[in-house]
Amino acid sequence: MEKSISKDSSKKKCNRYSGIGGQAVLEGIMMKNKEKYAVAVRKPDGGIAVDVETFQGTLHQNKLKELPFIRGVFNFVDSMILGIKALNYSAAFYDEEESGEVKKADSGSEQLMSVLVTVFSICLAVGIFIVLPYFLSLFFQKYIRNDSLIAIIEGVIRLVVFLLYVWGISAMKDIKRLYQYHGAEHKCINCVEKGRPLTVHDVMHSSRQHKRCGTSFIFFVMIVSIILFFFIRVDNAVEKVVLRVLLMPVVAGISYEIIRLAGRSDNLFVNILSAPGMLIQRLTTREPDEDMVEVAIAAVEAVFDWKAYLKDNFGYEVDDSWLKDTPQEAEDDERMDETVQKV
């Protein structure tokens, strides 16, 4: 009885910021907590491999990384580099599927490759989502002479291109599995931040949407760029393109502060602000299966003491007996979750 009461009461708590974040990779999850990160991968033989390392990022211990708006630029670049490193690690398992062993690349060459791929990815993203919408908006200048209206049309095109891109890749088989792991990542973070024990059952019944998701960050980049480009005008076409590219660090910095606030606040205004990004996450996440959740839990536990977190933030200790429900308790939890979803 004591166990079920404690679990029930924990479910009523508000979200508490945990500081952990992650990313889906090929058949796995990367989870990061401060400078420590872990990549958990479901191997071809069915086992789970977990690699734990540290990532200090660019300008380590530089005060610039602590300044509001500026820190967002460095965090964005760091997340791109780390994400590529994690993807390379997970892909190595399937490159070496016959032997089942991962051959790690030389650290220097791997770092250089990660930087080059990051630069290329950023240039490609800027070209598709920033420059392309501008040139597409030029077709409307033949019929519309109002600069403000053209700026709004450019912004609408930018949003449409982004949504079409997200929707288009979601139809790919491999991306669908990646989105399932993305959902497992969110569910794990939501589970602990809601004060629930990190079990497969509790994770499966947590939300797959999270306010600190990269999808929401990109959505805010789209919105901030629309507002910024609306008020900053130049006449020359080349200058317009160059200005849009040069302003992207500013856009990223502002967007990071918004997403950072969203992840630490539960007030009504922030929830409304986060709602569109959360809605788009319905496209970039899918419901995972229990095997995927097990991988996500392994990644979290490698870098984050969730039991200590629950004790410090929700006031209760998790005993090992909690980690396995009796049939009756599992049925009670199932009924409660169905009731919560209906409400």
Image (cartoon, rainbow, N blue to C red):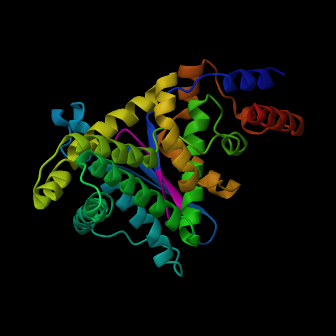
Q: In which quadrant of the rendered view does residue 116 lie?
A: bottom left
Please state if 102 lies on the left or on the right of 27 as rendered: left
- Image location (x, y in percent) of residue 168: 51, 67
Percent x, y of residue 124: 29, 65
Taking depth in this image into account, of 241 and 286 the one nearest to the observer is 241
Residue depicted at 15% across the width and 55% down the height: 240
Quadrant of the rendering where the C terminus is positioned: top right
Q: Residue at x 21, y 39 (%)?
A: 231
Residue at the (56%, 58%) spot, across then down? 179
Q: Which residues are drawn in magenta?
A: 23-35
Closest to the observer, 321 or 175: 175
- Residue 236 figure quarter: bottom left
Residue 33 in magenta stretch: yes
Regarding residue 68, the answer to whether it shows in the image is yes
Q: Quadrant of the N terminus?
A: top right
Q: Quadrant of residue 65?
A: top left
Q: Position of residue 196 (x, y in %)?
A: 65, 31
**Is any atom of residue 73 visible in this view?**
no
